[in-house]
Image: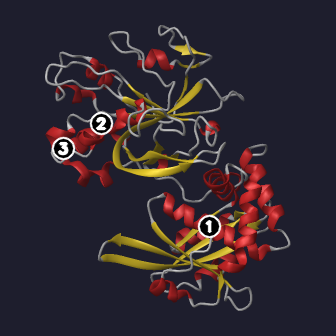
């Protein structure tokens, strides 16, 4: 099964059919030797256990995310699939109104049962780990159901308890969230040999024998553990220059509508957009596990080209490095672009060890991106598409999906978020928490 390949996932499909509608048949590719079907009907799909000769094992756990369901009552969260950087953040299946205790729902229970082996301190413990196969629903020819994309094999790296908000009722509930490392399949030409899972279904084989068709990255992780994760994590050596169309939401999508709302809400009062930009920058830093401290919005006059200030803390305990984050916000027509000179003005304000972040409703010109890559500027670019995606997530998390309500709160909160402090003061005092 090849990474990022699209598969036809049709209910009731005949497993003998190699293809359906011109696409590989998921059920044909994944059928176990004993006829057991691998299901993607739920988000988290643990297969049944096999009573193997050495110890019972679960052949795999299949995870599926459906972005078109995100924010609905059946899926009130937003999973993150960043395959280019080998990172997935996946929310558990506990929901508001679940009758089972936290951790007892089928999906969460399956992942929690697999957790100890994934965090095993010895190769013998890690040998018992259940592989996690990643999938996501994709739209094909306008159909949002019936197709999935294979997104690789993963190892669990972290889990935590989170509090989520139900978009329909506004009530909060507890859940788990799992951070996963997507493995590098370069040695296998970006493919997984499904015979590996066939072996895991075979009760006559020991766990060690099932590794003969496993990806080399999986075997290396079993042997070395956490020390191998940076080396076996998938990283795509793609161009860092993003085409302009990739920086804009696709026409007719929910994100396109959100971006238009943002522009209309702050056109004519663009200083208030600075608070939204600061909140979005905060969300982006935290999404990847960063410890980010919200700072303040600078005063409109004499801000020296800086619109907001924050702080990024690297490390933990007594070993922490605090980095000043300078932000620039630009609310302009979504069809326009930010040029290299505009980026350079922000970079010129950065001192050694400081980080810049630029948030806009528009896109970044190819020339601007080229200069950032060539000169290795320490600046994060958040374009119109990413802005709309993050605002939509924020609205679901805090306002039941009501983007207009979120934007009104931003407008009302702007005045209290403004300060005339110097940027370096965020290193000493930790910022003004104005939301």
Task: Judge whether residue 243 can be spotted in this image.
Answer: no
- On the image, the x and y values in percent for residue 340 come to 67, 74
**What residue sits right under mark 2 in the picture?**
114
Residue at 60 percent of width and 45 percent of height: 166
Q: Which quarter of the rendering shows the N terminus?
A: top left
Q: Nearer the viewer, mark 3 or mark 2?
A: 2
Distance between the Cα atoms at labels 3 and 2? 18 Å
Label 1 environment density (alpha carbons within 10 Å; few <14, some 14–19, many ≥20): many
Q: Nearer the viewer, mark 3 or mark 1?
A: 1
Q: Is residue 391 left or right of residue 150?
A: right
Note whether 216 is above or below 15 in the view shown: below
Return the disc, 2 or 1, that comes first in the chain's sequence.
2
Q: Foreground: 136 or 335?
A: 136
- On the image, the x and y values in percent for residue 86 come to 42, 48
Q: Secondary structure at mark 1?
A: helix
**What residue sits right under mark 1 in the picture?**
279
Label 3 environment density (alpha carbons within 10 Å; few <14, some 14–19, many ≥20): some
- State the mark number for residue 10: none
**What residue sits right under mark 3 in the picture?**
223
Label 2 environment density (alpha carbons within 10 Å; few <14, some 14–19, many ≥20): many
Distance between the Cα atoms at labels 3 and 1? 42 Å
Count of number-bearing discs: 3
Note whether 379 is above or below 152 in the view shown: below
Q: Are marks 3 and 1 in contact (CB under 8 Å)?
A: no
């Amino acid at each position: 099964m090849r990474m990022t390949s699209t598969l036809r996932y049709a209910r009731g499909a005949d497993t003998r059919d190699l293809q359906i509608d011109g696409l590989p048949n998921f059920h044909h590719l994944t059928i176990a030797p004993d006829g057991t079907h691998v299901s993607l009907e739920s988000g988290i799909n643990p297969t049944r256990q096999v009573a193997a000769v050495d110890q019972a094992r679960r052949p795999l756990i299949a995870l599926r995310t459906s972005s078109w369901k995100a924010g609905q009552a059946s899926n009130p969260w937003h999973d993150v699939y960043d395959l280019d950087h080998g990172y997935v953040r996946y929310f558990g299946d506990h929901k508001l109104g679940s009758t089972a205790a936290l951790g007892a729902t089928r999906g969460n229970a399956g992942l929690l049962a697999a957790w100890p082996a994934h965090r095993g301190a010895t190769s013998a413990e890690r040998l018992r780990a259940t592989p996690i196969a990643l999938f996501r629903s994709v739209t094909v020819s306008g159909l949002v159901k019936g197709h999935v994309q294979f997104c690789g094999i993963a190892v669990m790296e972290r889990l935590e308890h989170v509090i989520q908000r139900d978009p329909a009722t506004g009530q909060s509930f507890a859940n788990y969230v799992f951070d996963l490392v997507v493995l590098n399949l370069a040695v296998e030409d970006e493919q997984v040999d499904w015979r590996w899972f066939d072996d895991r279904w075979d009760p006559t084989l020991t766990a060690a024998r099932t590794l003969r068709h496993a990806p080399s990255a999986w075997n290396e992780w079993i042997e070395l553990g956490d020390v191998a994760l940076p080396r076996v994590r998938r990283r795509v050596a793609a161009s860092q220059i993003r085409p302009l169309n990739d920086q804009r939401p696709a026409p007719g999508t929910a994100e396109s509508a959100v971006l238009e709302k943002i522009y209309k809400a702050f056109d004519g009062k663009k200083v208030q957009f600075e608070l939204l930009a600061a909140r979005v920058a905060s969300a982006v830093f935290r999404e990847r596990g960063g410890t980010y401290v919200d700072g303040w919005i600078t005063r409109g006059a004499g801000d020296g080209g800086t619109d907001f200030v924050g702080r990024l803390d690297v490390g933990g305990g007594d070993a922490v490095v605090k980095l000043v984050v300078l932000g620039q916000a630009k609310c302009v027509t979504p069809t326009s672009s930010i040029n290299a000179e505009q980026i350079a003005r922000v970079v010129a304000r950065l001192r050694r060890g400081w980080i810049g972040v630029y948030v806009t409703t528009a896109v970044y010109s190819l020339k601007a991106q080229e200069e950032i890559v060539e000169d290795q500027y320490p600046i994060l670019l958040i374009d119109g598409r990413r802005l709309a995606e993050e605002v939509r997530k924020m609205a679901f998390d805090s306002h039941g999906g009501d983007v207009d309500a979120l934007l009104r709160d931003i407008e009302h909160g702007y005045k209290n978020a403004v300060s005339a402090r110097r940027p370096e003061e965020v290193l000493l005092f930790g910022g003004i928490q104005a939301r």
